[in-house]
Image (tube, rainbow, N blue to C red):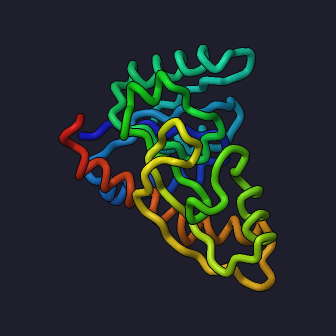
Amino acid sequence: MTRIAVLVSGSGQGLQSLIDAQGRSQLGGGKIVAVISSRPDVYALKRAQSAGIPSIVVTRKGATPEEFDFALLQKLTAAKVDLVVLAGFLSVVGPSVLARYTDRIVNIHPSLLPAFGGPGMYGLRVHTAALERGVKVTGATVHLVNEVVDGGEILLQKAVDVLPKDTPETLQSRVMVQAEQVILPQAVAMLAQERGAFL
């Protein structure tokens, strides 16, 4: 069994897609053993509680990046995590965590990388940029995480059409439902199966 930690900072819709996939036995032998939030008051923690998954808060407030990474690494190690999934996690994962989980951290990004990625590109900012650029197609990408923000190996992508009357909010919602929530569980299942040898 591949032990999975899901890192969150918000409502947890990506987390819910993974919980639902796990309920259908579609995580490729993976099991979510921990949900770690960077914020104490987010709905993702309620989703974890409802699913009976242990949840932990590791906040950046008052901590240096090194202290945050140390605390995060402690929690991941204590939970004996094999695979780390960033699902709407709004903190950059530092070098000590990257070194410990090389090629075992994945992120979901709401665009077809390398378009509209990099530092500062998250949430509605991505969809605003896509609309301002006038693209006709956008989507989502699951990629491995390395020291370059949104720069790791691309695992899966799914395209979504941009409609003439789209706003950043409508586009965000459609990309989330039609792309993010589809390919994130697929990629996690793929890693749990194909990369089982590294565990």
Can residue 46 be seen by looking at this rendering?
A: no
> Is residue 170 placed above or below 105 in the rendered structure?
below
Estimate the x, y position of residue 91 in percent, counting from the top left. 64, 34
Image quadrant occupied by the C terminus = top left
Task: Decide if residue 77 is on the left or right side of residue 93.
Answer: left
> Is residue 199 placed above or below 172 in the rendered structure?
above
Q: Residue at x 30, y 45 (%)?
A: 30
Image quadrant occupied by the N terminus = top left
Q: Residue at x 66, y 24 (%)?
A: 59
Can residue 29 be seen by looking at this rendering?
A: yes
Q: How many marks?
A: 0
Residue 115 versus residue 64: which sits nearer the camera? 115
Q: Residue at x 27, y 53 (%)?
A: 28
Estimate the x, y position of residue 174 in percent, counting from the top left. 65, 71
Q: Residue at x 77, y 66 (%)?
A: 169
Residue 15 versus residue 131: which sits nearer the camera? 131
Given the current orientation, which residue lies at the most extreme left position?
197
> Is residue 74 placed above or below 174 in the rendered structure?
above
> Is residue 81 placed above or below 182 in the rendered structure?
above
Task: Decide if residue 26 is on the left or right side of residue 96.
Answer: left
Figure quadrant of residue 126: bottom right
